[in-house]
Image (tube, rainbow, N blue to C red):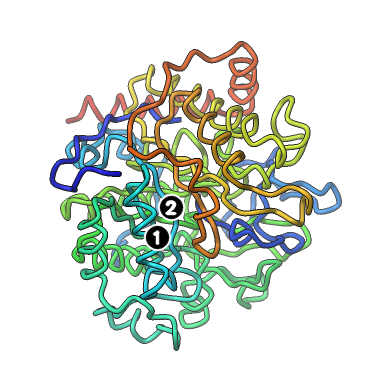
Amino acid sequence: MKNRWSTLLPAAILLACAEVPAERAGVMPASGTDAVQPMTAQADSFDASGAAADGAPVDSLDLHGASPGVSVSVTTQELGASARAADTTIRARAPAQIRGIYLNAYAAGSARRLPALLALADTTELNAFVVDVKDEKGIHYRSGLELATQLAQPGEQTIRSLSALVDTLHAHGLHAIARIVVFKDPILSKAKPEWSIRTPDGELWVDKAGNTWVSAWEPAVWDYNIAIAEEAAKAGFDEIQFDYIRFPEPYASLPDQVHPKAAGTRTEAIVGFLEQARERLHPLGVIVAADVFGLSPNDGRDINIGQQWEDILAAADHVLPMVYPSHYLPTHLPGVRTPNRMPYETVFKSVGAGMVRAQRLADNGVTTARVIPWLQAFDAPWIDREYSYGPEQAKAQIEALYEVGVDDWIFWHPGSRYEHLSAAFERTTASHAKAFEPSQELIEFADRIDSAGARAARERVSGAASNAASTQ
C-alpha cells in the first residue's frame, strides 16, 4: 500500500552500483541472440569503417556474455559533461523506495489486465509501473510526431491516451515510468536505411535473430527517440527508461558493423545519447534511466556493446542492470555454479560487485546513478524445466539486494503476470536496505574487474568530473 503521489517523500539518493534483450521476455533465446555475454579482450572502439577495432567474440568459444545537425562525436575529455553533478532536484522526485513491475503495452491498454495489476499494487508495496511506450514493434500510443505516426504498426497502438493512463497510475500512488526501446529498431531501420548499421557491402546489417538496427552514432536516431520521450514526459510520466541503448554484439560469424557516422568509442556514443536526453528531458521534470546488461557491473570494459559501468553510472539518473539469474553461466560469477537455481547468490554477487565499483567511483568525486535492478519473475525452461520462479525465488532476489544496500527493484515478466509472486511482496513500502559492508570475496571480485578495465574507466570518469567542476 502506497501513500498518494502528493505525499511521497523525496527519494533517498543511493550511491548506485534492464536494456531488455528479447530473451528476457522469458522465452528461450535463439542461438546467438542477446544472451548475456562476457566480453573478449576487445577494445571499446571502432575503426573509421565502423567495424570493431580489435576483433569480436568468437562463436566457437561459446562466449556469452541529437537533434539533426548535432554532432554525435564525444571525446574522452568531453565525458566530463556526463560526470557533472546530477540534478538532485529531478532525482528527488522519485519515491524513496522503488518497488515496481513491467507492463507490456497490451496489459497497459487492457480493460481487464490493468485493473488487476492496479489492485495488486493497491494491496502491496508495489509503487512503480514500467510501461512500454515504444519497443521493437514501434509506438504503442497515438503520437503527434509525423515519423512515429507513419511507422506505427497496425494493432500496436494499444494505449488510447498516454495522459489518461498516467492519471490513472498517479491516482493509485504509482511512479509512472515510460520504457522506450532505442537502437534495436527494425521498423525505423528499414524505413531509414541511411540511419542504420550496414555491412561492408552496403546492405542492412542483420543480427542473429534477424533484426536490423539503427546506428547509435546517428544524430537523427537520437532526436527521434528523445522526441518520443518528450511526448511521454508531457503526458505526465515521471521517468523515461531507455532500453536497448547499446550496440548489437559483434559476433565473428556476422559481417562487420559499418556505422557511417562512427566517431570515438561505443561507450562515448551511448553516453552522448544519454547526455542529450538529460539536457532535453530534465527541463520537463523527468528522470532519465538506462537499462543495461546484467553483466555490465561485472565487466571492466563495455561487454562489446557500449555499456561500460562507470561511464553509464555517471551519465544517467537511474541505471537498471538486468540481473536475471537465468541469464548467467556457471563461469560468470565466483562460486555460483547453477545461477538459475541460486537466485540469492546470483543477484548478491552481480549487484554487490557493481555497488563496490559505484562506491569507489563516488569516493573519487563522481555523482553516480541510483541503481534499480531488474529481477526475474519468469520461468526459464530452456535452462531448467524442473525449476520455477515463484514467491520463494522472488524473495531471495529481493533479500540479496537489501544485503548489498540496494532498496529498489523492478520485476520483469513477458506477459505482465505477477500474481504468482504476490506472497513475496510486503503490504507496505518501507526501507529494508542494510548498510553495505562488502565481504572479502566481493572486494576481490571487484578488484579483478578493476584490473580488467574498471580502474582505468574510474580514473577517466572521475578526472572528467573534476575538470567539469573546475570550469563551472
Q: Above or below — where is 70 with respect to 341? A: below
For badge 1, the amino acid type reads Leu
Label placed on residue 241: none
The secondary element bearing badge 2 is classed as: strand
User: Is residue 235 rendered to the left or right of residue 356?
Assistant: left
| Circle 2: residue type | Ile
Q: Find out whether the residues at labels 2 and 1 contact each other: C-beta distance under 8 Å.
A: yes
Residue 91, given in percent of the width and then of the height, sits at 24, 39
Q: Give coordinates of residue 403: x percent, y percent.
A: 50, 23
Query: Which residue is at 37% across, 50% downward?
Result: 272
Tell me the residue that label 2 is attached to.
101
On the image, the x and y values in percent for residue 108 come to 38, 68
**Disc 2 or 1, which lies upstream in sequence?**
2
Q: Position of residue 439 (x, y in %)?
A: 58, 13
Which residue is depicted at the point 56% across and 26% down? Answer: 353
Q: Nearer the viewer, mark 2 or mark 1?
A: 1
Rounded to the nearest angstrom, the CA distance separating label 2 from label 1 is 9 Å
User: Relative to the observer, which residue lies in front, 138 or 5?
Assistant: 5
Pointer 1: what residue?
Answer: 117
Relative depth, front residue between 76 and 84: 84
Number of marks drawn: 2
Q: Quadrant of the N terminus?
A: top left
Asked if one can make out residue 265 in the rendered structure from this viewpoint, the answer is no
Closer to us: 374 or 227 = 374
